[in-house]
Image: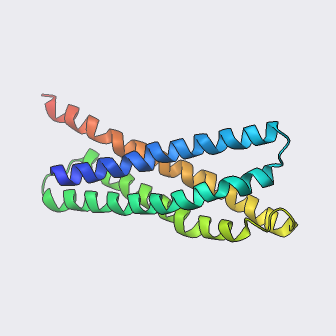
């Protein structure tokens, strides 16, 4: 793996895994604190939504950078690909796809509903439905990023075995 592709890949995965995990932790903590202080969940969600809206842009950028990094590696190593390397490419692509789904298919409609969820029951129901889908998609992004991040550690071990 070239240094450029490796650095791009690792920086991207740091955001996709570490950044996403941190955003989830902060959001859960803030909603719990708001609920403990008597703030309705809908209001807490509306207040916290800008963090997810802005992070979706970072997430999409990191997913693009990940695909570029993996593409550079793929182009540089056309003939030498083991099963773990192919698995890494696959999990990186899945990570990028879930990040794109979150950033472009889930967040924009949620952003449009954000102001309406306080007063419109249909908007509140649709927001809740999108939120439930987003939890799975965002969780998948984190999981695929972690797997892609860890797979090279096993690639190195395998090549050292007799």
Return the x and y of residue 78 as percentages of the image width and height: 14, 60
Nearer-the-camera pick, 150 or 24: 24
Q: In this view, does 22 lie to the left or right of 70?
A: right
Q: Is there any visible trace of residue 1 in the rendered image?
A: no
Q: In this view, does 20 lie above or below 99?
A: above
Q: In this view, does 15 lie to the left or right of 10?
A: right
* Image quadrant in which you'd find residue 134: bottom right
Return the x and y of residue 95 as percentages of the image width and height: 43, 55
Return the x and y of residue 59 as percentages of the image width and height: 46, 58
Q: Which residue, as the protein is rendered here, is positioned at the far top?
A: 162
Colour mode?
rainbow
Which residue is depicted at the point 45% across and 42% down?
18
Q: Is residue 120 left or right of residue 64?
A: right
Nearer-the-camera pick, 115 or 71: 115
Return the x and y of residue 122 as percentages of the image width and height: 84, 69
Q: Is residue 129 above or below residue 37?
A: below
Q: In this view, does 105 lie above or below 88?
A: below
* Image quadrant in which you'd find residue 156: top left
Q: Is there any visible trace of residue 9 in the rendered image?
A: yes
Which residue is depicted at the point 45% across and 62% down?
60
Nearer-the-camera pick, 125 or 36: 36
């Amino acid at each position: 793996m070239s240094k450029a592709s490796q650095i791009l890949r690792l920086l991207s995965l740091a955001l996709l895994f570490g950044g996403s995990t941190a955003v989830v932790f902060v959001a859960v903590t803030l909603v719990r604190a708001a609920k403990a202080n008597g703030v309705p969940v809908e209001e807490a969600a509306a207040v916290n939504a800008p963090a997810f809206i802005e992070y979706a842009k970072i997430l999409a950028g990191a997913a693009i950078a990940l695909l570029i990094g993996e593409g550079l590696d793929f182009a540089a190593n056309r003939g030498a690909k083991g099963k773990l390397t192919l698995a890494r490419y696959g999990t990186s692509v899945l990570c990028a796809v879930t990040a794109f789904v979150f950033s472009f298919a889930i967040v924009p409609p949620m952003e449009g509903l954000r102001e309406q969820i306080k007063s419109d029951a249909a908007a509140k129901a649709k927001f809740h439905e999108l939120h439930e889908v987003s939890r799975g998609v965002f969780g998948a992004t984190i999981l695929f990023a972690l797997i892609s991040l860890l797979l090279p550690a096993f690639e190195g071990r395998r090549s050292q075995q007799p």
